[in-house]
Amino acid sequence: MPCEKRARTDAPPPHCAQGFLTKGKKPKPPPYLLRVPLDVLVAILSLLCPIALLNVARTSKDFYHFLTSPSASIVWKSARGQVLGLPVPSPPKDVLELRWAVLHFGRSTCNVCHDHTASIDLALLLRICNECRRQQLVTRYYADPSIL
Ligand SMILES: [Zn+2]
């Protein structure tokens, strides 16, 4: 039986059904550290403090995706335990560990004006300075009673 020649298509080859291979480009392998077994990676990253984990998450998309995945929650929990001083509480269920770490260990400037040093507002999940709080937020003392 003669071999039939396959028709040329622009579709990606079957081994790259996700389409991450593009014409003329080889797929980029994940960083070496992400190719180690998961338990080894977790053991290595568990030694880091939250600020170091934030820096690792900012190095590549692969690390970002790993550190925002549920399997990395033990890494963040270990990192929070290494902070000296007051213990950092666990994040609420609907907040990513990475976002929680940015809130507590990221820049201490205001998220609104990016100028002044600000304190953490856990209700708003951001850092806000007193001036922005006064200008941007409406409290029950200043709100129109008819809309309450
Ligand atoms: Zn501000």
Image (cartoon, rainbow, N blue to C red):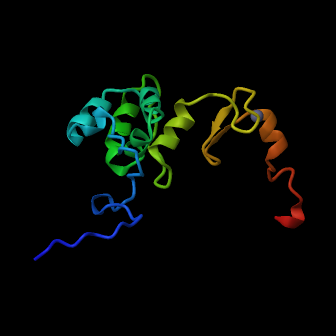
Name, please, the residue furthest toward the left: 1
| Residue 43 appears left or right of 9 | left
Q: How many marks?
A: 0
* Closer-to-camera residue (56/23): 23
Residue at image x 70%, y 33%?
Answer: 110
Name, please, the residue furthest toward the bottom: 1
Look at the picture and state if 13 lies above or below 134.
Answer: below
* Closer-to-camera residue (2/131): 2
Q: x%, y% of residue 36? A: 22, 37
| Residue 2 appears left or right of 118 | left
Residue 63 sits in quarter? top left
Residue 56 sits in quarter? top left
* Closer-to-camera residue (127/66): 66
Q: x%, y% of residue 81? A: 37, 31
Name, please, the residue furthest toward the front: 2
* Closer-to-camera residue (5/59): 5
For ligand 1, which image quadrant applies? top right
Residue at image x 56%, y 37%?
Answer: 103
| Residue 38 appears left or right of 119 | left
Quarter of the image with the C terminus is bottom right
Q: x%, y% of residue 52? A: 43, 26
Residue at image x 47%, y 48%?
Answer: 96
Residue at image x 79%, y 38%?
Answer: 132
Look at the picture and state if 125 lies above or below 16.
Answer: above
